[in-house]
């Protein structure tokens, strides 16, 4: 019954709106399924570890813990990411899907020391 | 430390300075009052300070996703207001609204950039020597940013009458399209939107970290590895502004 009703209803929805709906579902990700998670620590204006290996071609969750009292901004031109991490707090940054390769990142507030690289590798 | 602070403040100031200079030139050209500028700067500064103080609390919500959503919303709002400015400009009965809209747009633009600058400085509050250094750097960065904005302003005003409106509208269109593209990145970062990977990689041509890359980023939101959604929405927004510019050009004398 319900399916029949839904079917009839969707037929009424104009084709343009339907395309829009499909696009929206295609773009949004409402299912917060478990994604591979990696943690990075900021301490004395250094990223630990400075090299993070992540799987390529999939979305990855980075958790950046700032153990310093000072704020820092996680930034990467290659990843197109930019996020302030307040002192003694953490920030979550989703990245990817990435092609295999190296993606440098840095702390914008202390760029001379805070440097690191995300390395996306193909998982066989 | 000085160089770092010059770069940080310059990057933030440049984005705001460009929007300010275009809207200021726009006001001058349209013979509108420009007192909105000082109000916008004052309100934007107070707002930045408040936002910088709320941010530690805000970034605890939803694993910090609230921060990304707020900044993306600010970007979308600026674009909506700039769109309204362009839309209402051709309607003489509505021009009295323009100063308020510009005040709002500049206020929001300063809010986002100013908040980051203030957060950066809070890290040095306990160290007087470093604070001195980064303050000098900040003043230099701000001065360079304001100078570039001033150059942009005078260049725009030196345009011949027939060229002013199309050029300004196209500039506002590029700035808006860039802001939308940035907002989409923030939504990717927060996992609200999903990217299908980069559509192309032009980093070999122009690196985002280079001077030209930074300038292009400020003017038109240049990204070397944009997603399909970013590119399509970019052209969509730029196209709307172009359409509005073309519509006005057709009108005889305003």
Image: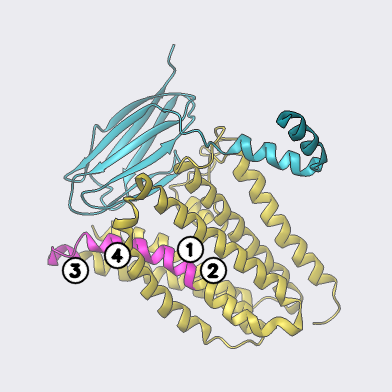
Please state the horizontal and vertical placement of residue A86, each as a whole percent of the image: 27, 53
Spatial CA span between label 2 and label 3: 29 Å
Please state the horizontal and vertical placement of residue B118, each as a whole percent of the image: 31, 65
Q: Chain of mark 2?
A: B
Q: Which residue is mark 2?
A: B19
Is B115 magenta? The answer is yes
Give the number of the mark in front: 4 or 1. Answer: 4
- What residue sits 47% from the left and 40% below the top? B191
Q: The chain drawn yellow is chain what? A: B
- What residue sits 41% from the left and 63% below the top? B113
Give the number of the mark in front: 2 or 3. Answer: 2
Is any part of residue B154 visible from this angle?
A: no
Q: Chain of mark 4?
A: B
Q: Earlier in the sequence, mark 4 or mark 1?
A: 1
Spatial CA span between label 1 and label 3: 25 Å
For the N terminus of chain B, the image quarter is bottom left
Local packing at callout 4 (Cα closer than 10 Å; few below 14, some 14-19, many 20+) is some
Local packing at callout 3 (Cα closer than 10 Å; few below 14, some 14-19, many 20+) is some
Q: Which residue is mark 1?
A: B15
Spatial CA span between label 3 and label 4: 22 Å
| Residues at discs 1 and 3 in contact (Cβ within 8 Å) | no
Foreground pick, B31 / B184: B184
Res B53 label: 4
Q: Which residue is mark 3?
A: B132
- What residue sits 35% from the left and 60% below the top? B116
Magenta segment: B107-132
Q: Earlier in the sequence, mark 3 or mark 4?
A: 4
Res B143 label: none
């Amino acid at each position: 019954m319900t399916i029949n009703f839904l079917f009839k209803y969707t037929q009424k929805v104009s084709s343009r709106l339907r395309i829009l709906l499909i696009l929206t579902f295609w773009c949004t990700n409402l299912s917060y399924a478990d994604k591979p998670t990696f943690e990075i620590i900021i301490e004395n204006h250094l990223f630990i570890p400075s090299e993070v290996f992540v799987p390529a071609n999939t979305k990855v969750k980075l958790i950046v813990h700032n153990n310093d009292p000072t704020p820092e901004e996680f930034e990467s031109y290659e990843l197109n990411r930019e996020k302030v991490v307040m002192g003694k707090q953490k920030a979550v940054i989703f990245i990817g899907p990435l092609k295999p390769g190296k993606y440098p990142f840095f702390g914008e507030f202390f760029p001379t020391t805070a440097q690191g690289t995300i390395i996306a590798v193909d998982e066989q | 430390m000085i160089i770092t602070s010059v770069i940080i403040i310059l990057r933030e100031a440049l984005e705001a300075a460009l929007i300010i200079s275009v809207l200021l030139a726009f006001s001058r050209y349209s013979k509108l009052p420009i007192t909105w500028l000082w109000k916008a700067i004052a309100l934007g500064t107070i707002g930045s300070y408040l936002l910088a103080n709320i941010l530690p609390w805000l970034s605890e919500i939803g694993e910090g996703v609230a921060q990304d959503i707020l900044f993306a919303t600010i970007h979308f709002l600026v674009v909506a207001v700039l769109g309204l400015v362009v839309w209402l400009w051709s309607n003489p009965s509505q021009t009295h609204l323009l100063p308020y809209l510009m005040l709002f747009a500049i206020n929001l633009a300063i809010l986002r950039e100013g908040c980051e600058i203030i957060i950066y400085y809070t890290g040095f509050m306990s160290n007087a020597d470093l604070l001195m250094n980064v303050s000098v750097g900040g003043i230099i960065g701000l001065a360079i940013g304001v100078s570039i904005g001033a150059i942009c302003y005078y260049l725009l005003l030196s345009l011949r009458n027939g060229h002013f409106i199309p050029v300004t509208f196209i500039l506002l269109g590029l700035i808006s399209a860039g802001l939308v593209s940035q907002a989409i990145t923030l939504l990717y970062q927060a996992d609200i939107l999903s990217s299908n990977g980069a559509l192309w990689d032009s980093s070999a041509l122009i690196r985002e970290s280079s001077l030209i890359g930074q300038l292009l980023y400020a003017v038109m939101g240049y990204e070397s590895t944009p997603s399909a959604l970013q590119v399509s929405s970019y052209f969509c927004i730029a196209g709307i502004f172009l359409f509005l510019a073309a519509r006005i050009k057709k009108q005889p004398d305003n």
